[in-house]
Image (spheres, rainbow, N blue to C red):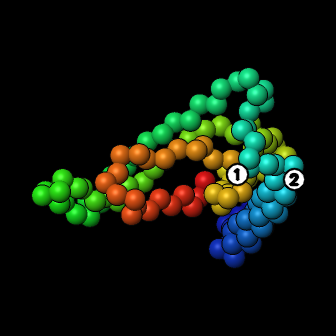
């Protein structure tokens, strides 16, 4: 028998799917970080290079000091790489297509900006 579906039925279906995804996501986090070491370069073979893409997006010009030729900005740094150890079979974790980690839990490339006018700058890498 096919008929109209009530809003309440749709809400229950969506809730069930969301709660299952949460369960699979928690399981995936545990599995991925079980033997993970953020100090190890994430490659299958240590002789292989790891390609890191790097880009900078200007978000805001904070100040222009023409006399001292200093430009103060707010920028976003974006780095992208493939971490060999953070891969999973999506059929084992239905609905989980990506995960986010705090920056301290995973390997990160050691990249710094050197062209700065003083040592009074701030670099925050908070999410990965």
Looking at the image, residue 39 lies above or below residue 15: above
Q: Nearer the viewer, residue 18 or 10?
A: 18
Looking at the image, residue 110 lies above or below residue 64: above
Where residue 31 appears, x then y in whole percent? 86, 52
> Which of the 4 image quadrants contains residue 88?
top right
Q: As drawn, is 49 to the left or to the right of 26?
A: left
Where residue 14 appears, x then y in whole percent? 70, 66
Looking at the image, residue 42 lies above or below residue 75: above
Q: Does residue 31 appear in this view?
A: no
Residue 34: which disc?
Answer: 2
Residue at point 63%, 47% (across, down): 108
| Residue at the farthest left position | 67
Of the image marks 2 and 1, the number of the one nearer the N terminus: 2
Q: Nearer the viewer, residue 19 or 54?
A: 54
Where residue 77 appears, x then y in whole percent? 45, 50
Q: Nearer the viewer, residue 66 or 73?
A: 66
| Residue at the farthest top position | 47
Q: Does residue 11 appear in this view?
A: yes
Residue at point 58%, 44% (across, down): 110
Q: As drawn, is 123 to the left or to the right of 23?
A: left
Where residue 115 appears, x then y in whole percent? 35, 46
Secondary element at image label 2? loop
Secondary element at image label 1? loop
Quarter that holds the N terminus: bottom right
Marks 2 and 1, how far apart at CA: 12 Å
Q: Which residue is labeled 1 in the image?
A: 106
**Dot 2 and dot 1 residues touching (CB under 8 Å):** no
Residue at point 12%, 58% (across, down): 67
């Amino acid at each position: 028998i096919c008929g109209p579906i009530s809003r309440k039925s749709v809400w229950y279906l969506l809730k069930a799917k969301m709660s299952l995804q949460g369960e699979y996501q928690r399981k995936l986090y545990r599995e991925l970080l079980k033997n993970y070491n953020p100090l190890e370069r994430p490659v299958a073979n240590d002789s292989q290079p790891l390609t890191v893409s790097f880009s900078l997006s200007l978000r805001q010009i904070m100040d222009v000091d023409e006399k001292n030729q200093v430009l103060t900005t707010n920028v976003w740094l974006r780095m992208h790489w493939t971490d060999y150890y953070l891969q999973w079979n999506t059929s084992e974790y239905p609905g989980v297509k990506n995960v986010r980690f705090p920056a301290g839990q995973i390997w990160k490339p050691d990249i710094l900006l050197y062209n700065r006018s003083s040592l009074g700058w701030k670099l925050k890498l908070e999410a990965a």
